[in-house]
């Protein structure tokens, strides 16, 4: 630790306002901001956090940001990191639930397309940078390639989980001579913290489901739906969509049309897709309780992942000085590079690049970002301007 919660909040808030493109793109923005610009942690530490959070249910980018805030400024820093990254899109989603604006027109769609092209450039730079640090030798490059290839065909959260497990096993055999002791992250996170976090996670999971209030369509039942969704989903916001739709629409919380309208609007938001919960909570609520229900849904869907990340980080810190554990982490980190490379193609590239003109925009922007160190905000302006010009 060495910073303040206010500092963390300011940096996370800027990321929450500008991080378009989904969880994989978020990890690219985080790598640039927290690792290369701010130097709050090393590439190896950052890779370890991604490895841990990819193995856990919940929103990966929010979990990683939460743990970075914890490392930088303690528990207040962790809270500041989550609030700063989550609040902008949560407020926008809440406002959408109240005012239900029309579907974005052609001009707004061109702007959003330019922002998606920006995400391609940022993720590509992150993959390039992390591959040089986390897969610098032949064994780890082999693991990265072996992880990337199957994920180009299978995109589920389960496939990602199994790929990281495979990277861990490969690391035991291939990375013993290259692994090295990693610093504990963060210092002072004791085992009792891990057990407390795990206990709270289990108690809430059991308590919300068994409460008599769960039988009525009220705040406790709402919290139960979103908490269970956050506790059991691997793979991020796109995977949680069918779970929430199945829980909310047939039971009459809201219509399918209104559910899908919120999901479509969420695609255009910066920050985590899980903030769709703020929209769904408000859209399901009695008119005079919309803010309360939005807050309940938002906290409930994020909380299980943050509790599990806290518990897992304690274990990561305790084993970081073990040779076998470091070999495992080296293998998983290499697999993370493969995972990010596969995600760079699908969904980031596939969803954004539609023509040869888009390819040219991405290449020029990447050169400006990588070689000329152009600030990302100018890259975003370039991509949006080019998209508008071609619309």
Image (cartoon, helix red, strand yellow):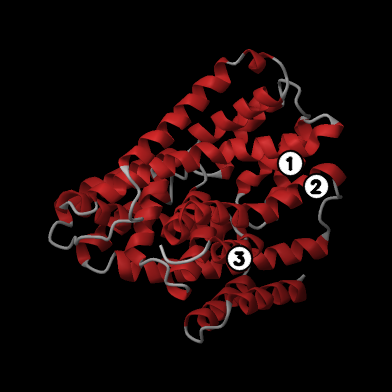
Image quarter in which the C terminus is found? bottom right
Query: Looking at the image, do the residues carrying marks 1 and 3 touch, with CB atoms under 8 Å apart?
Result: no
Q: Which mark is residue 279?
A: 1
Give the distance between the C-alpha atoms of the residues marked 1 and 2, in whole angstroms.
7 Å
| Mark 1 vs 2, N-terminal side | 2
Q: Position of residue 315 (x, y in %)?
A: 30, 44
Q: Which mark is residue 96?
A: 2
Query: Looking at the image, do the residues carrying marks 1 and 2 touch, with CB atoms under 8 Å apart?
Result: yes
Position above or below: 292 against 217: below
| Mark 2 vs 3, N-terminal side | 3
Q: Write the residue at 59% across / 61% down.
A: 9
Q: Which mark is residue 10?
A: 3
**Can residue 166 be seen from the camera position used here?**
yes
Give the distance between the C-alpha atoms of the residues marked 2 and 3, in whole angstroms.
25 Å
Q: Position of residue 332 (x, y in %)?
A: 30, 52
Give the distance between the C-alpha atoms of the residues marked 1 and 3, in whole angstroms.
24 Å
- The residue lying toward the viewer, choosing from 323 and 154, is 323
Q: Secondary structure at mark 2?
A: helix
Q: Residue furthest bottom?
A: 372
Image quarter in which the N terminus is found? bottom left
Q: Secondary structure at mark 1?
A: helix
């Amino acid at each position: 630790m060495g910073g303040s919660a206010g500092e963390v909040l300011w940096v996370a808030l800027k990321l929450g306002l500008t991080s378009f493109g989904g969880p994989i793109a978020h990890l690219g923005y985080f790598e640039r901001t927290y690792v290369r610009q701010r130097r709050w942690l090393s590439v190896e530490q950052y890779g370890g956090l991604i490895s841990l959070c990819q193995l856990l249910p919940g929103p990966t980018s929010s979990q990683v940001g939460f743990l970075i805030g914890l490392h930088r400024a303690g528990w207040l820093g962790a809270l500041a990191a989550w609030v700063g990254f989550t609040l902008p899109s949560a407020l926008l989603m809440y406002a959408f639930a109240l005012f239900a604006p029309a579907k974005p027109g052609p001009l707004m769609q061109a702007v959003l397309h330019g922002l998606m092209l920006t995400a391609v450039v940022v993720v590509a730079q992150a993959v390039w940078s992390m591959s040089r640090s986390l897969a610098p030798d032949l064994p780890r490059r082999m693991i990265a390639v072996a992880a990337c290839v199957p994920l180009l065909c299978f995109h589920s959260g389960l496939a990602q989980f199994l790929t990281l497990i495979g990277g861990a096993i490969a690391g035991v055999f291939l990375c013993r001579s290259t692994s090295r002791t990693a610093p504990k992250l963060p210092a002072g996170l004791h085992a009792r913290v891990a057990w407390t976090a795990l206990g709270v996670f289990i108690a809430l999971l059991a308590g919300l489901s068994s409460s008599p209030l769960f039988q009525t369509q009220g705040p406790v039942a709402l919290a139960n739906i979103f908490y269970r969704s956050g506790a059991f989903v691997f793979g991020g916001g796109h995977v949680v969509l069918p779970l929430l739709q199945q829980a909310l629409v047939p039971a009459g919380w809201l219509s399918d049309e209104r559910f899908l309208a919120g999901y479509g609007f969420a695609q255009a938001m910066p920050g985590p897709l899980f903030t769709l919960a703020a929209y769904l909570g408000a859209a399901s609520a009695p008119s005079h309780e919309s803010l309360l229900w939005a807050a309940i849904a938002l906290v409930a869907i994020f909380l299980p992942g943050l509790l599990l990340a806290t518990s897992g980080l304690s274990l990561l810190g305790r084993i970081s000085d073990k040779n076998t554990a470091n070999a495992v982490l080296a293998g998983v980190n290499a697999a993370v590079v493969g995972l990010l490379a596969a995600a760079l193609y699908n969904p980031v590239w596939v969803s954004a690049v539609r023509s040869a003109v888009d390819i040219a925009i991405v290449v020029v922007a990447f050169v400006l970002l990588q070689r000329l160190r152009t600030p990302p905000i100018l890259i975003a302006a370039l991509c949006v301007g080019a998209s508008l010009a071609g619309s």
